[in-house]
Image (tube, helix red, strand yellow):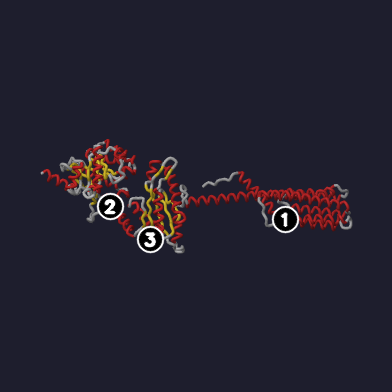
Amino acid sequence: MPKLPLPAGTLDSERNQAILVEQFRALRKQVPLMYAMMFVDSAFLAFAAHGTVSPWLDLGIPAALALLSALRAAFWLRRRSFLPRPEQIPQYLRGTMIISAVLSLGFGGWGLVLFAEGDLVRRVCIALYIFIGAISCCYCLQALPRAGQSVLLFGAAPVTACLLFSDDWFLRGLGFNMVVVAIVVLWMTRTNHAGFIEMLTSRTHMAAEQLRAVGAEQRAHDLAYHDPLTGLPNRRALAEALERRLAPEGDGAPLGLLIIDLDRFKSINDVHGHPAGDQLLRDVALRLDATVGACGASYRLGGDEFAVIVDGDVEGARRTAHGIVHAMQKPFSGAELVHHIGASVGISLYPQDALDLDTLMRRADIALYKAKQLGRGQHCAFEPMLDAEIRRRAEIEREMREAVERDAFVPYYQPIVDLRSGAVVGYELLARWDRSDGAAIGPELFIPIAEECGLIDTLMLRLLRRACRETRDWEVPIAINVSPTQLKDPWFSQKLLGVLIREHFPARLLTIEITENALIVDAQSAQEAIESLRNQGVQLALDDFGTGYSSLQHLQMLPFDRLKIDRSFVTSMDRDPQALKLILAIIALATTLELPVVAEGIESRAIAETLARLGCAMGQGYLYGHPMSAADIEAMRSATAA
């Protein structure tokens, strides 16, 4: 990840503040020492001039200088552990410069008076004391060069000038030496201060780099442990949180793991685009967090899958899962759209269901799968029987893949008859699994597994290819069920028509049956695929009418050739008045739309006669024959013809 440079103004401001702070820290250590040295030099000057000047010059002035130095030293000693705000420091520095100049001027002026009154030896001593004191003070004020320069200017310059312009060559030489030393000291002071500034600048840049590194590390940590879209902790964070809780040294407190999968989210992405889907995921994350509250922690695992860790037993986990399902059923309002989705939740518990991370996650997924099977918008807790069921399904899937390769799935045919004449007018193609061990696995089990694992397309097309060969000479229509997942395949119609062309089977003799749920999943793809087939003469039936999301819009959406009444209504119509009313309504609707009706599940002559009186055109069921192989149909047709 590239480093983000700090603005130049920010760095300059930080550097200036750092310089001020370090200047203050250095001064509060060195200024008291400077005043102590000034006190000592004043005492030596007074001693050197003793007996040659008045008591006021010998004692009064040094006492005043000593008192003022003591007061300033005390002022700084009281601030040895105090650090003012950066904006207050310039005030302290200005005060130090002024006081240093005043004291230096007083010290230098007093020394100049003493110098004028003394003999040669005393003049040399006085000049040396003044110069050494000024140089020492200048060194103590290296952190504040201007103050050091003022000390040399007001303290040492007057007496140095006197030496340079004196009549004695010895004193002139001493003055010249002092000038050279002063120049060197000033140059060193300036160089040291420049190094001081450079060091602070480097330190400021280093601190900025450290802050940038810390920021980069924090961003990397956030990216590693948080989902960038929703801001929730991610799968890695969930795994580490569970590992800490499940570790032998953990607290061992019971917890529940909830795996949440959004219902109907993919259709939002497909219809309204990924930006709408991303915003919906952010809204889901906010609502999930609000629903879970303080009783747990929310995570996003990826796609439309989330997770929650909750503390407590199964009852607490169930209450949280129920709250999540209820919350996700409420509409999500966007800027222009209102989305209606839902959620399915699987629950596994520690330590009741699992003692390790992988098993806990897997069993929560198993419970989620069961919740989806229950009809979505449900929550389900793991039970041992679910694990066995999943293993059984996995074994069936493995066996199915082998069976598809060796054509162990065979087409069976159930007659469709005219209810008035009793004549066979077509057959519905049904799949049967010819297992080598003879064990029966019905289509109600292997068809959903085939849809989930992606085998349904291969299975259906192979069955259709074989059925075309077996029924080509019957000259009667055959009907085949099409899965909703197949209608989402943009190449489905071409695949199906390709089978008809290769097998020389007339398209007008094939009817594809779809359920209303297929139109709900992806209406646009279904419409495009079916219109392509209809253009080639393939017939279209709406299967299981009345059990799905029945709507007149579905009948308007596609040019259906017939409606099929679900067997659940037909088998109960003789004892359930409500079922009879529904059948009557469906037949009346179909008559108005000029669509023939096929009733499924006819098992008695009385029901067949009632359906015929109500206007139902065709029917199928055990009354007219169980699903049979092609050989059995051939035998039955031969017997009828004879």
Three-letter amino acid code at disc 3? Asp
> As rendered, which of 629 and 135 lies closer to the eye?
629
Distance of mark 1 from mark 3, alpha carbons?
70 Å
Q: Position of residue 485 (x, y in %)?
A: 32, 45
Q: Is residue 390 above or below residue 503?
A: below
In screen coordinates, is 333 left or right of 538?
right
Query: In what element is the residue under mark 3?
Result: loop
Distance of mark 2 from mark 1, alpha carbons?
90 Å
Residue 229, disc? none
> Residue beneath label 2, please?
445
2 or 3: tag closer to the N-terminus: 3
Q: Dots 2 and 3: beta carbons under 8 Å?
A: no
> Residue beneath label 1, please?
76
> As rendered, which of 132 and 383 lies closer to the eye?
383
In screen coordinates, is 505 left or right of 89?
left
In screen coordinates, is 310 left or right of 552?
right
